[in-house]
Amino acid sequence: SAVISQKPSRDICQRGTSLTIQCQVDSQVTMMFWYRQQPGQSLTLIATANQGSEATYESGFVIDKFPISRPNLTFSTLTVSNMSPEDSSIYLCSALLTANTEAFFGQGTRLTVV
Amino acid sequence: DAKTTQPPSMDCAEGRAANLPCNHSTISGNEYVYWYRQIHSQGPQYIIHGLKNNETNEMASLIITEDRKSSTLILPHATLRDTAVYYCIVRVGTGAARQLTFGSGTQLTVLP
């Protein structure tokens, strides 16, 4: 597998502001995903980050709230916009090296909105 | 993807085998069984996967029943570092849709 670095690892933000989370992979990957893990809960897929095109969002998640970029095969960003305390979660980046390999994950970004 | 059912929690003595069950009675013929684990404050880690044959790697063994409606993940000699939430996921093994759907998982606590 490869290594995913997420930045920041944690942050405390004021409500109404936005935070951009970066996901950097040390190898080129075919697919990248963003997940959210609310306190005490399992992981929920937010979207698939598509290189050079708009991300594919899951039900309940919209681009205006969670804009995603993927400019190349090793990097993606997730922005949490106009934050409220309900956005306090761990946000995780995941990737696949190829279509036939298994997903690996970053360590996550722990976001607290106050 | 088929849904899975796992016990919410299990304990295991250090050095003993940990057997984690998963029920996936609605699994389709082209769906694989995947296991991931999440150690506290870390991202999920891939453990093993299988279609219908039993599988073994350096981390664990996966036993799938003949009718494929259930499976068991076996950690042969559990250590304290194996304490984690273990997720059983059923999904199609190939194709463009490679995202994972996580259930609630099993909290395994390895006791000294």
Image (spheres, coloured by chain):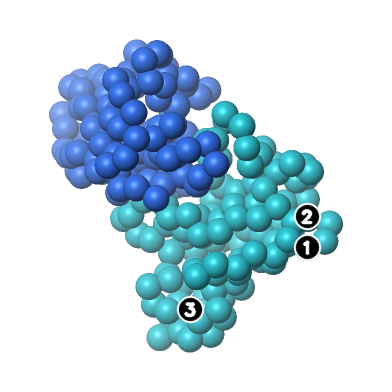
Chain colours: A blue, B cyan
Q: Quadrant of the C terminus of chain A?
A: top left
Q: Is residue B3 left or right of residue A113?
A: right
Which residue type carries mark 1? Thr
Q: Earlier in the sequence, mark 3 or mark 2?
A: 2
Task: Residue B80 in the image: state x and y as whole percent.
Answer: 39, 77
Whether the residues at callouts 1 and 2 have beta carbons within 8 Å, the answer is: yes
Q: Residue at x 79, y 43 (%)?
A: B29
Label ID, residue A82: none
Q: Earlier in the sequence, mark 1 or mark 3?
A: 1
Question: Is B70 rendered above or below residue A48?
Answer: below
- Mark 1 chain: B
What residue is pinned by disc 2? B69
Q: Residues within 10 Å of mark 3 (few under 14, many from 20)?
A: many
Which residue type carries mark 3? Ala
> Please, what secondary structure does the residue beneath circle 3 have?
loop
- Mark 2 chain: B
